[in-house]
Image: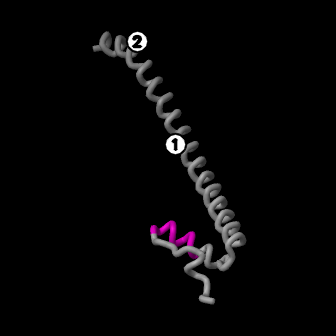
Amino acid sequence: MTALLSNLGLDESGATAIEYSLIAGLISLVVLGWATFTGTTLTSVFENIAQSLALACSRLFGGLLHSEIEHAVVELRQGAAVPDADDRRPPG
């Protein structure tokens, strides 16, 4: 029995697999953290671009107020169809 326990303590065949699994686990945590940070950053960048484009189009074509632009952006995110600027202008 003591020989079995002493041989078990000297056996290092599983040590490499454990080390590789720890390294893989740490790498996956780093990738997950990086993806979360990058996704949040990219979302805010594209939202800023969308708002800037909407404001520029409003100034170029006229007729839409800033609150209407924000409302249109919300509707677009929800998948609703938003009418063109010409459809919102009063007749005349």
Give the residue type at disc 1. Answer: Leu
Name the image quarter holding the C terminus.
bottom right
| Image position of 11 with respect to 87: above or below | above
The image position of residue 37, as x and y in percent, is 59, 48
Give the camera-side residue of 84 and 82: 84
* In front of the other: 81 or 15: 81
| Disc number for residue 10 | 2
Q: Earlier in the sequence, mark 1 or mark 2?
A: 2
Residue located 46% across and 24% down the image: 20
Report if residue 57 lies within the magenta region: no
Please tell me in which quadrant of the rendered image residue 88 appears.
bottom right
Dominant SS type (magenta): helix
Left or right position of 45 against 14: right
Disc 1 versus disc 2: nearer the observer: 1
Colour approach in the figure: one colour
Pick the front one: 29 or 75: 75
Q: Is residue 30 above or below residue 80?
A: above
Most extreme residue toward the left, as rendered?
1
| Amino acid on which disc 2 is placed | Leu
Classify 10 Å Cα crowding around label 1: few (below 14), some (14-19), many (20 and above): few
Q: Which mark is residue 54?
A: none
Q: Residue 11 appears in which quarter of the rendering?
A: top left
Q: Which residue is mark 1?
A: 32
Q: Quadrant of the N terminus?
A: top left
Task: Quote the CA–CA distance across marks 1 and 2.
Answer: 36 Å
- The answer to whether 28 is drawn above or below residue 4 in the figure is below
Residue appearing at x 62%, y 62% in the figure: 50
Query: What count of labels does the image hold?
Result: 2
At mark 2, the secondary structure is helix
Residue count near mark 2 (Cα–Cα under 10 Å), binned few <14, some 14–19, many ≥20: few
Range covered by the magenta-colored residues = 71-79
